[in-house]
Image (cartoon, helix red, strand yellow):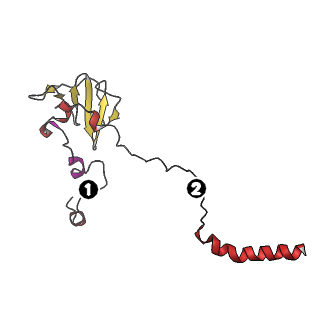
């Protein structure tokens, strides 16, 4: 008699449980953090100087620049700054080593240097074909025509 009763209870639960379990959900959450954001920084400026460059003051500014070298090179408050391929770099000596610096950490007088004192003005590296493959940073129509 007990086996029949047990079978009846199991059968009743099997019929009732799908209806009763209609609002039940089971979930598993494994705490795996998102992968770190990858940031690719441009290489440091190609500044190789055997001797300190001749520095000239930017008129109306406490910043100096080096008109005799081919990269953006500024001196201010005992540090050297360079804007190269869209990023700012800082060094404690004229020949480096250069380290990337966030734009918000670049002193305001350096950021305020007029574009006329840059060897390669911000945004012009792409137009001059430096640092990128041909056609990158160029509108598709002009790139197809080979005009940039």
Q: Quadrant of the C terminus?
A: bottom left
Which residue is rendered at x = 75% and y = 76% of the image? Answer: 12
Quadrant position of residue 97: top left
Q: Quadrant of the N terminus?
A: bottom right
Label 2 residue SS: loop
Q: Is residue 42 above or below residue 143?
A: above
Magenta residues, as a range? 117-136
Mark 2–mark 1 Cα distance, whole angstroms, equals 43 Å
Residue 136: in sight, yes or no?
A: yes
Image coordinates for residue 133, horizontal then vertical, percent: 31, 54
Q: Is residue 4 magenta?
A: no
Q: Main secondary structure of the magenta part?
A: loop
Q: Mark 2 and mark 1 in contact? Answer it, CB < 8 Å.
A: no
Which residue is rendered at x = 23% and y = 22% of the image? Answer: 77
**Front tag of 2 and 1:** 2
Image coordinates for residue 33, horizontal then vertical, percent: 52, 49
Residue 47: in sight, yes or no?
A: no
Which of the labelled discs sits on residue 137, or is there none?
Answer: 1
* Pointer 2 local density, CA inside 10 Å: few below 14, some 14–19, many at least 20: few
Quadrant position of residue 48: top left
Q: Is residue 26 above or below residue 49?
A: below
Q: Is residue 134 magenta?
A: yes
Which residue is rendered at x = 24% and y = 66% of the image? Answer: 144
Q: How many marks?
A: 2
In this orientation, which residue lies closer to the viewer: 134 or 117? 117
Which residue is tagged 2?
29
Q: Report the side of 97 relative to 7 (left or right).
A: left
Image coordinates for residue 67, horizontal then vertical, percent: 16, 32
Q: Report the side of 43 relative to 79 (left or right).
A: right
């Amino acid at each position: 008699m007990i086996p029949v009763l047990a079978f009846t209870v199991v059968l009743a639960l099997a019929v009732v449980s799908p209806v009763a379990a209609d609002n039940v959900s089971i979930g598993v959450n494994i705490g795996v953090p998102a992968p770190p954001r990858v940031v690719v920084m441009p290489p440091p400026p190609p500044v190789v100087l055997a001797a300190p460059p001749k520095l000239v003051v930017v008129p109306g500014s406490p910043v100096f620049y080096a008109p005799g070298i081919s990269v953006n090179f500024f001196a201010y408050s005992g540090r050297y700054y360079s804007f190269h391929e869209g990023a700012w770099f800082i060094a404690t000596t004229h020949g480096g080593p250069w380290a990337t610096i966030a734009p918000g950490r670049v002193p305001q007088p350096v950021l305020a240097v007029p574009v006329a004192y840059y060897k390669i003005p911000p945004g012009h590296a792409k137009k001059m074909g430096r640092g990128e493959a041909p056609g990158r940073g160029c509108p598709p129509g002009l790139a197809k025509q080979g005009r940039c």
